[in-house]
Image (cartoon, rainbow, N blue to C red):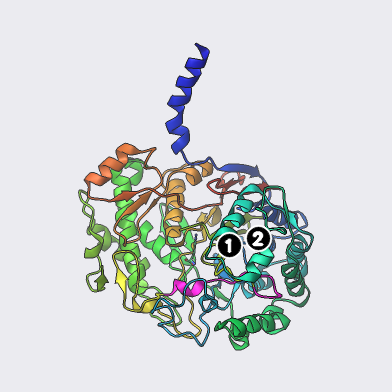
């Protein structure tokens, strides 16, 4: 009898447990908080805070540590964006996106012979100079003390958990992974599969990090380490030269600022598309009372999808490296959004093809990573960085031990070819020497009355911007606590393909039926990994929420 009741209870529970998103794991503190996907890297950040470092110091140390402990996206061979909100001042953005080598031509990928796994797919890495710029302008502790913990993790080895073991086994077993140095460095000695509890030692990477710690960031761009990268490129037909490396510069840029329901939302400016698109979508949605409709009302999801389509159309139409392409200022204005809002039919999905008739149309993994940090004084840091694909182009630089990005594939790889499948071939994001490829990375800091309240961001390629939109709306419009805001099922539409992706297909079947009736195509896919922090404006209490869709840890002082 009891067994039958138990079985029945299990059967009843199953749809719920099988479909709900994993609950975010939280930590609450009056002091500093670090939240990231990799537990040992979160611990490094916390140690720096406890040693008197500020949030920028902790972010720099966490980023270097993740280059060791989260090799699929943590990096020194890639690039990213770091948003910083210094107490009492406007937030700023340290942009360290990769650049195109001078030798790259716009049609580099056009004939399909050069793939994302090629040495030619690598952009000039920005991370080391980016972290150095953030540290120089906003850090407090000595540079060396922030890089050495990562060097030590690599030299002495660290414990691989089940998630990392699974990721490594997958990439090593994939027939596409052919680079011998990658296999030597990341393969388990003896050729067996990695298991949780194993130790991973990365000697060459440890040495590289020690050189960066002792000699500073320039050692990566001009010294012995630059020699190693140039040698690797020459041996394998890659494009990056020592001159490209030496010329690389990280920039401090003014963020994109949007206002929404009394909150100030700051995101990265171009060459990220994130800040512009978030501002455009929030400005459109501000014209409707979503809260009254309810978070899971079909009207709300319909409006979100329609806002997404319009912002992503503008992304394809206008966005690229601002040093090479003129970006219309009106994209982030309230007036422009009002006009776009007026084009939304409340009863019917707008076909994507109607949104940009001037663009001729021929007919994801978690390989980026985001972390959030706040210190005891309220300095907030939101950092997203990447190698583009998981483990970048799966090439380890001989002797230097780090993985190269394949960020050149973020340019519009087939000039002129924009398709209903999602290819974009428009001019603003075509390859040019020294140009930065357009990114979707969207580390965001939201302020209320001048003080940071929300730090968030995510991996997920083009889905990143919409993951961030969902989290920002969940908090600002719907007042959800941060763990719910992070766990709640996410929505994505990117103009083309003309279909929305929704994590809640199984948990919200009625909503899906109604959206389909409005003319939307809905598919299901997991989306993002949004490690976030909420700072209660009344109590000052910080709650870090680790998104458990993948892995992650929130730690507090
Ligand atoms: O910068 C970008 O937008 C991409 N390189 C990000 C890639 C990414 O997020 C892949 N996976 N999650």
Magenta region, main secondary structure: loop
- Circle 2: element type: helix
- To which residue does mark 2 refer? 66
User: Does 70 appear above or below 180?
Assistant: above
- Can residue 334 be seen in this snapshot? no
> Foreground residue, 444 or 229?
229
The x, y position of residue 67, in whole percent, is 65, 64
- To which residue does mark 1 refer? 73
Look at 35% across and 74% down and name the residue there: 318
Q: In this view, does 290 lie to the left or right of 75?
A: left
The x, y position of residue 43, in whole percent, is 71, 52
Q: Which of the 4 image quarters holds residue 344?
A: bottom left
The x, y position of residue 131, in whole percent, is 64, 70
Q: Do the residues labelled 1 and 2 touch (CB within 8 Å)?
A: yes
Q: Which of the 4 image quarters holds residue 225?
A: bottom right
Q: How crowded is mark 2: few (under 14 residues within 10 Å), some or many (20 or more)?
A: many
Find the distance from the CA under tag 1 to the CA under tag 2.
Answer: 8 Å
- Magenta-drawn stretch contains 401: yes
User: Does 216 appear above or below 195?
Assistant: below
Q: Label 1 CB, ligand 1: below 8 Å?
A: yes
User: Does 508 appear above or below 305?
Assistant: above
């Amino acid at each position: 009898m009891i067994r039958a009741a138990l079985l029945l209870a299990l059967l009843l529970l199953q749809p719920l447990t099988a479909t709900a998103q994993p609950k975010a794991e939280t930590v609450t503190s009056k002091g500093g908080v670090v939240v990231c996907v990799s537990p040992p890297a979160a611990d490094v950040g916390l140690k720096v805070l406890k040693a008197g470092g500020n949030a920028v110091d902790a972010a720099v140390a966490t980023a270097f540590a993740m280059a060791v402990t989260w090799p699929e996206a943590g990096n020194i061979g890639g690039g990213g964006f770091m948003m910083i909100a210094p107490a009492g001042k406007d937030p700023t953005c340290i942009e360290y996106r990769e650049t195109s080598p001078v030798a790259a031509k716009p049609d580099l990928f056009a004939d399909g012979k050069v793939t994302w796994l090629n040495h030619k797919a690598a952009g000039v890495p920005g991370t080391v100079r980016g972290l150095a710029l953030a540290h120089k302008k906003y850090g407090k502790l000595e540079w060396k003390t922030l890089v050495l913990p990562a060097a030590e993790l690599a030299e002495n080895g660290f414990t691989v958990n089940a998630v990392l073991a699974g990721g490594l086994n997958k990439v090593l077993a994939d027939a596409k992974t052919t680079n011998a140095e990658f296999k030597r460095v990341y393969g388990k000695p003896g050729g067996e599969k990695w298991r949780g509890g194993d130790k991973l030692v990365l000697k060459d990477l440890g040495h590289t990090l020690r050189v960066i710690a002792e000699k500073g960031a320039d050692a990566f761009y001009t010294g012995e380490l630059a020699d190693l990268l140039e040698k690797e490129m020459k041996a394998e037909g890659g494009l990056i030269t020592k001159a490209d490396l030496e010329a690389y510069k990280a920039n401090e840029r003014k963020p994109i600022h949007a206002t929404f329901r009394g909150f100030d939302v700051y995101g990265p400016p171009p060459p990220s598309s994130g800040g512009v698109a978030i501002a455009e979508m929030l400005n459109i949605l501000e014209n409707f009372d979503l809260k009254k409709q309810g978070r899971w009302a079909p009207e709300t999801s319909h409006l979100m999808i329609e806002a997404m389509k319009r912002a992503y159309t503008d992304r394809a139409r206008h966005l690229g490296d601002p040093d090479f392409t003129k970006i219309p200022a009106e994209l982030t204005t309230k007036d422009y959004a009002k006009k776009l809002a007026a084009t939304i039919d409340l009863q019917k999905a707008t076909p994507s093809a109607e949104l940009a008739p001037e663009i001729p149309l021929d007919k994801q993994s978690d390989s980026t990573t985001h972390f959030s940090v706040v210190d005891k004084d309220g300095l907030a840091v939101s950092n997203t960085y990447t190698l583009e694909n998981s483990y970048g182009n799966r090439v380890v630089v001989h002797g230097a031990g780090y993985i190269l990005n394949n960020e050149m594939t973020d340019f519009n790889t087939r000039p002129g070819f924009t398709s209903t499948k999602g290819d974009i071939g428009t001019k603003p994001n075509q390859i040019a020497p020294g140009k930065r490829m357009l990114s979707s990375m969207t580390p965001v800091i939201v302020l209320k009355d001048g003080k940071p309240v929300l730090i968030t961001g995510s991996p997920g390629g083009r889905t990143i911007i919409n993951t961030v939109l969902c989290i920002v709306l969940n908090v600002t419009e719907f007042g959800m606590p941060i763990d719910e805001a992070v766990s709640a099922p996410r929505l994505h539409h990117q103009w083309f393909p003309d279909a929305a992706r929704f994590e809640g297909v199984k948990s919200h079947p009625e909503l899906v039926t109604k959206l389909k009736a409005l003319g939307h195509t809905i598919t299901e896919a997991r989306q993002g990994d949004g490690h976030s922090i909420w700072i209660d404006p009344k109590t000052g209490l910080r709650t870090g929420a680790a998104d458990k869709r993948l892995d992650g840890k929130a730690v507090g002082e």
